[in-house]
Image (cartoon, helix red, strand yellow):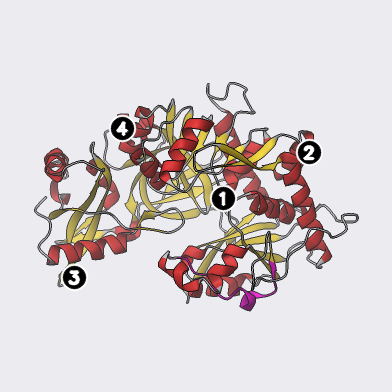
């Protein structure tokens, strides 16, 4: 698909490609299709002129947008391997991870270099931190430079003689750093074939069903490469979601996208700002409850889909809100495996996945066709995946193993923004099970406590010891619930006499 994208961009160069929004929500064209193609070609020429050749690794610290996409296209054309630098991982962790990848060059925009340099202190307060980029190898600036930035990558290198990669599809395409510590970092390596397969699967989702209707030029809202590439390939412009919930709500109203892809935290924030939706809405990267998807449909969406995806395999399964709401069993239904995805459960109850879009390997390790997800799960009679919680999130209470994912869906009654079950040390190796619930804005706690009484009772021996109302900490790129932080928060609130019996 990345091969097809370059040709598709040049076929209609005058049309908008990447959009953004003003504060009023009005649409602004960030780049046309022709401008995006020209920028990608210029970056490819500049990288080739620097002596980079197929198989070399390039670190990428560029914010989502036209330049980041053009960098991806340039790396793909030359057969280079991109290593994505995430400022949310922390400098020490990233430094250890990149010691494995050993980039020949780091491409960074001015914002990334500020996070790694003069703006390090305020960036830390926003939980963003990059190591000194110069210590990772040569650095080149992509886009406008600020004082103290590395020399520009430049866009004036000769374009004649720049090759197009013609090697094997089994070659590495991208490295995405994931779990691990400074002592044992882990990095997911996707091959060119695997990356292409994942994008093909996303394209099939977007083009399936009555909402497609053949209107390929209708805009799509979303900021990930897995949204940008398939949408642009079929001719649809892509709008980057506004960061402010209020602006995002205005952007949705004025843009009226056919397909919208937002993370669950973005959806919750947008709904809190009064956003209205239309067409199909997709969400993933963090758990999406049936209640959240129902709220999206109540706000105007024709369909609301939860996508189960991992860094190692994107996407793996999908479920529409009506199907998810109709599920009454224990656990979290995430849907049937998508075409080409195989699912199994090992002897410990852990979900295993395989398929063309699965990662090739972890950097420094041997290839393995099966992805060990770390999720406990079962396959129901229809072959659908039902999650039962993270293996490592198990709570041990009175010699009973309790998996929060089996019961957390019951916390999401109307009026609940987010709910988790966490363990709090109770001494002697035992734990208390605590329900931490974040109310929607304006919903009184007594009303929620009453609404939760029946779902809590139905949890049986897994009924929580205490119920707390608090804002749940989030972490990571996808702003998933931070269970360790939520446990620490619960312990502090209980010690202060907050909360009550569940």
Q: Which residues are magenta?
A: 128-140
- Above-or-below relation of 34 to 277: below
Horizontal side of residue 155 vs 438, given as left or right = right
Q: Earlier in the sequence, mark 1 or mark 3?
A: 1
Answer few, some or many: residues within 10 Å of disc 2's Cα (few below 14, many 20 plus, some between 14 and 19).
some
Residue position for label 4: 327
In the image, 396 versus 143, the foreground residue is 143
Task: Report the side of 330 relative to 400 (left or right).
Answer: right
In the rendered image, which residue does mark 1 sit on? 358
Q: Is residue 392 above or below residue 69?
A: below
Disc 1 packing (10 Å; few <14; some 14–19; many ≥20): many
Q: Earlier in the sequence, mark 4 or mark 2?
A: 2
Judged from the image, the secondary structure of the residue bearing numbered disc 4 is: loop
The residue carrying mark 2 is 10
Residue 418 horizontal/vertical position (percent)? 29, 47
Q: Magenta stretch containing residue 280, yes or no?
A: no
Q: CA distance from mark 3 to mark 4?
A: 35 Å
- Mark 4 or mark 3, which is nearer the start of the sequence? 4
Question: Which picture quadrant has residue 132?
Answer: bottom right
Residue at image position (54%, 36%) is: 26
The residue wearing badge 3 is: 429
Picture quadrant of residue 348 = bottom left
Q: CA distance from mark 3 to mark 2?
A: 63 Å
């Amino acid at each position: 698909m990345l091969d097809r994208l370059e040709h598709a961009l040049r076929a209609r160069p005058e049309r908008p490609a990447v959009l953004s929004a003003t504060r009023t929500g009005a649409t602004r064209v960030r780049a046309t299709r022709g401008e995006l193609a020209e920028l990608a070609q210029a970056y490819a020429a500049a990288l080739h002129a620097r002596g980079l050749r197929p198989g070399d690794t390039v670190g990428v610290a560029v914010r989502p947008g036209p330049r980041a996409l053009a960098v991806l296209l340039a790396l793909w054309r030359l057969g280079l391997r991109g290593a994505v630098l995430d400022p949310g991982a922390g400098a020490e962790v990233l430094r250890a991870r990149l010691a494995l990848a050993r980039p020949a060059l780091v491409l960074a925009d001015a914002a990334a270099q500020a996070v790694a340099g003069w703006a390090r202190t305020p960036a830390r307060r926003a939980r963003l931190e990059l190591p000194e980029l110069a210590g990772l190898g040569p650095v080149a600036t992509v886009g406008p430079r600020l004082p103290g930035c590395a020399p520009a990558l430049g866009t004036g290198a000769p374009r004649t003689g720049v090759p197009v990669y013609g090697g094997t599809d089994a070659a590495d395409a991208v490295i995405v750093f994931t779990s691990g510590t400074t002592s044992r970092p882990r990095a997911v390596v996707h091959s060119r074939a695997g990356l292409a397969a994942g994008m093909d699967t996303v394209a099939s989702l977007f083009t399936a069903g009555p909402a497609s209707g053949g209107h390929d030029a209708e805009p799509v809202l979303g900021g990930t490469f897995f949204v940008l590439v398939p949408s642009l390939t079929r001719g649809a412009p892509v709008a980057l979601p506004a960061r402010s919930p209020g602006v995002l709500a205005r952007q949705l109203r004025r843009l009226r996208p056919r397909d919208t892809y937002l993370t669950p935290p973005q959806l919750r924030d947008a709904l809190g700002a009064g956003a209205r939706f239309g067409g199909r809405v997709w969400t993933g990267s963090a758990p999406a409850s049936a209640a959240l998807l129902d709220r999206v449909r109540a706000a105007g969406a024709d369909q609301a889909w939860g996508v189960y995806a991992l860094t190692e395999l994107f996407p793996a399964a999908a479920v529409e809100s009506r199907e998810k709401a109709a599920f009454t069993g224990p656990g979290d239904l995430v849907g049937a495996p998508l075409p080409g995805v195989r699912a199994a459960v090992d002897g410990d109850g852990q979900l295993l996945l395989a398929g063309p879009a699965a990662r090739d390997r972890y950097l420094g390790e041997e290839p393995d066709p099966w992805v060990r997800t770390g999720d406990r799960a079962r396959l129901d009679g229809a072959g659908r995946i039902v999650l039962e919680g993270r293996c490592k999130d198990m709570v041990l209470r009175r010699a009973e193993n309790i998996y929060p994912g089996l019961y957390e869906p019951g916390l999401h009654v109307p009026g609940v923004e987010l709910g988790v079950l966490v363990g709090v040390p109770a001494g002697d190796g035992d734990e208390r099970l605590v329900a931490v619930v974040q109310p929607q804005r304006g919903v009184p706690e007594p009303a929620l406590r009453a609404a939760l009484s029946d779902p809590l009772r139905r949890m049986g021996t897994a009924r929580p010891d205490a119920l707390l109302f608090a804002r749940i900490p989030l972490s990571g790129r996808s702003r998933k619930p931070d269970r360790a932080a939520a446990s620490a928060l619960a312990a502090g609130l209980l010690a202060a006499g907050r909360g009550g019996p569940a």
